[in-house]
Image: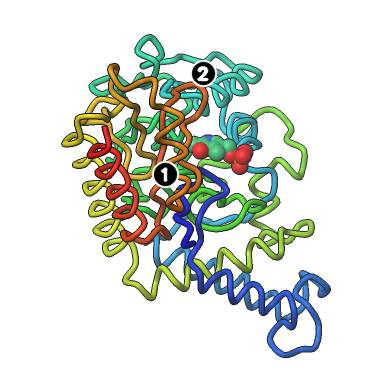
Amino acid sequence: MVKHNFNAGPAILPRIAIENTAKAVLDFNGIGMSILEISHRSKEFQAVIDEAFALFKEIFNIPEGYQVIFLGGGASTQFAMVPYNLLEKKAAYLETGVWAKKAIKEAKLFGDINVIASSAAQNFTYYPKGFNIPTDVDYLHITTNNTIYGTELREDLNSPVNLVADMSSDFLSRPVDVSKYALIYGGAQKNIGPAGVTVVIVREDILGKMSRTIPSMLDYRTHIKDGSMFNTPPVLPIFTLNETLKWLKNIGGLTKIEEMNIAKANLLYNEIDRNKMFVGTVEKESRSRMNICFVLNEQYKELSDTFMEFAKNKGMVGIKGHRLVGGYRASTYNALPIESVQALVNCMQEFEKMH
Ligand SMILES: *Cc1c(COP(=O)(O)O)cnc(C)c1O
């Protein structure tokens, strides 16, 4: 049976990226060894990481003055690394979900945190808008897409202070005006690669301003200086990331992928709104294109497990909602074909006919 992979992360990747990774694991570039067995400083791997840097800059349209870094440690390490490098006294945070809360918790270890807007009281069912950004803070931290709740900002804020964004779950899903951000980070495993590599894009002039000393591994400057080779980088995840970037460039880059992502999201949201059995869980204006959350309408609630089983038998994978939201979550990341969304929609329509 065909599987439709709606996993939230690690998640679906382009088939070509997986096939090329499989080949490189068996015999990398015809050198008679696996990519797993060679030095990260070999000229063969250097070519891979160089291509990945170049493609990231090209596809994401990164202006002069910014650096791209590939790190280990996941986005969660960035929750601490950001304040370690940028927080002298005070920072502003948007509290828009679980990941934002975790980022706030870490930042509080380093200074005063001003939560300038929060949707916590409404169980994070909307993305706050119209908040005032204070000017007496070192930076404003936002989470552009809230993976668990399914809300997304989808615009580049005009911030009077350095803007820092966790883009883990909508990285490379649309064109972004990078010049509006001081730092962007994300774990690869939601939308751009396998688990194990974290991408950081940083405007270099914001670094080196802290009074505290920063351990080498936690200092962005270390990794910039050594081209992400201060220590051994996650070699295989970077290889697969590069293959994913090649695929993205080939299909037409961010303008094209945004079109495709909008088409997929519209298809599913339209069905959620049309189908009498289902209802979305977040405010319409805040709906995420990447993580689409919905539940059964009140009068059908007892069919919750029945629909899950029904969908599973038709090849749907990973549609169980996060325990904090319940119901269903379909993650419709870049690599998910619209045919999979159509299959889920068909499933919902068939289920409606049966009840
Ligand atoms: C998954 C996720 C994280 C955590 O990523 P790790 O790489 O597992 O540390 C952080 N932020 C967002 C928005 C996420 O979706």
Ligand 1 is located in which of the four quadrants? top right
Q: Secondary structure at mark 1?
A: helix
* Closer to the camera in the image, 21 or 60: 21
Q: Is residue 197 visible?
A: yes
Is the residue 338 above or below the residue 350 in the image?
below
* Closer to the camera in the image, 57 or 102: 102
Which residue was labeled with disc 1? Answer: 311
User: Decide: marks 1, 2 in contact (CB < 8 A)?
Assistant: no
Residue 97, position as x, y percentages in the image: 45, 24
Residue at far top of view: 121
Q: Amino acid at mark 1?
A: Ala
Q: Amino acid at mark 2?
A: Lys
Residue found 70% across the figure and 28% down from its top: 212
Mark 1 or mark 2, whichever is nearer to me: 1
Which residue was labeled with disc 2? Answer: 90
Residue found 58% across the figure and 34% down from its top: 82
